[in-house]
Amino acid sequence: MNTHNHAFNEISVPLPREVDSEIAGDIEKESVFVSPFIDRIFVQDGKTARVVCKAGADLAEVEAKAKRFLEVMVKQVSGFEIKVFVDTKRKDTGPYFRGVNDELVKRGWMHDYGKGQVAYSGPVLKLAKLINDKAGELYASALGAKDAHFPAMIDADTLHKCGYFDSHPNAVTFVGNVVEDFDAIEEFRLANSCSEGALLPKQEHIHIDGMCLNPAACFPAYPTLTGQTFKEGQCFTWLGRVFRYESRNINGLDRLYEFNVRELVFVGDEDFVRDVRKKSLPIVEELASFIDIDCQVQTATDPFFATVSAAKKFWQAAQEVKNEIKIPALSNDGSQKLLACGSINLHGNFFGKRFGFTTVNGEPAQTGCVGLGIERWVLAAFTQHGFDESRWPEAVRNIIFR
């Protein structure tokens, strides 16, 4: 029987089936997208969900929505064999540093705006630039990758073609503007001319014209390939600005709304794409060794929206199309966690079909990508080396601390 604790606005809901820690973690992370009246859902002993509700919530309505969410989430299949392709070990023997985000703010090297955006300078900025530049150099020397640049905004039609609305609708950010109406604009101007804080336009005065903030660094590249025929495979690399709405999951450099990704996209026939994925593994290993950090590359799946999570995660795991770059860091309580700092992905001919680019035999070309989350690499490096300059490899400290 479900129990209601009105004093703490909590609901206890038995799970439809017992789940392991992997699925429990997915439930807790994705629970912020269940209802505006749910603060978080916690899984206890793999059998019960503790739904923490906000004040004023209709508990019966919240419970019904939480049950629907839990019913689809527990259908996920876990326990696939995790294959490890890269496993670097650092030479630094010092302890991991706890509380990196707070220490960076304290030293004035980072400013946290509190909404998933950060500003940084000093050694943090220098390290971020070094990681990005080093990765770009490795891609160019090992793969002949060509430099590219793409905008931070992307149109909704492109995201639709990329399948993003079907897989991750909760992470999308639409760009809006005040409607082209004299009275609406004047009303907005007058409201803010003497107000103490910002007053937003009325909802009916906001116009969404189909532009979004780009949620994946690789997406803007595919429209530029339309109509091309690839006799030989090609690689492109750039620094992309990425935006993923994370609701209440934002946490310092661990999980940002706005962040930077060093991207690599490779396009050609199946043999070329699989060969580049294979060659990307030692590149990641070399980058991790250069910074001297513990790092693994292993099979993984994406965090899809609840209603499609079970089917899409199963397909990804079964096909082994996603490898994730996992770097150890510390949680707020000091426990060690594996931070997802990037991924290596195979797309098959999905984008070739959707955007109309082919190989010389007329078949849709295949693609793959590697994305490195710059801010997470920075966080992991400071976690593993701390703030004693002598613990950092000489080639790195001579750049970031000078």
Image (cartoon, helix red, strand yellow):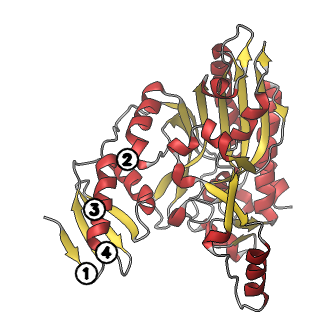
Look at mark 4 in the image and give the residue it sits on: 58
Residue 278 picture quarter: top right
Label 4 near label 1: C-beta < 8 Å? no
Horizontal arrangement in the rendering, residue 42 relative to residue 217 (left or right)? left
Horizontal and vertical percent position of residue 348: 59, 23
Label 4 near label 2: C-beta < 8 Å? no
Look at mark 3 in the image and give the residue it sits on: 64
Look at mark 1 in the image and give the residue it sits on: 6
Question: Cα distance, mark 1 to mark 4?
Answer: 11 Å
Label 3 near label 4: C-beta < 8 Å? no
Task: Using the image, tell me which numbered label, if any, was put on residue 22.
Answer: 2
Q: Residue at x 66, y 51 (%)?
A: 377
| First in sequence: mark 1 vs mark 4 | 1
Residue 14 picture quarter: bottom left
| First in sequence: mark 2 vs mark 4 | 2
Between 92 and 127, the one lying in front of the other is 127
| First in sequence: mark 3 vs mark 2 | 2
Callout 3: few (<14), some (14-19), or many (20+) C-alpha neighbours within 10 Å?
few
Q: Amino acid at mark 1?
A: His
Horizontal and vertical percent position of residue 225: 77, 28
Judged from the image, the secondary structure of the residue bearing numbered disc 3 is helix
Q: Residue at x 26, y 70 (%)?
A: 60
Residue mark closest to the camera, 2 vs 4: 4
| First in sequence: mark 2 vs mark 1 | 1
Between 151 and 27, the one lying in front of the other is 151
Q: Amino acid at mark 2?
A: Glu
Label 1 near label 3: C-beta < 8 Å? no
Judged from the image, the secondary structure of the residue bearing numbered disc 4 is loop
Question: Cα distance, mark 4 to mark 3?
Answer: 10 Å
| First in sequence: mark 3 vs mark 1 | 1
Callout 2: few (<14), some (14-19), or many (20+) C-alpha neighbours within 10 Å?
few
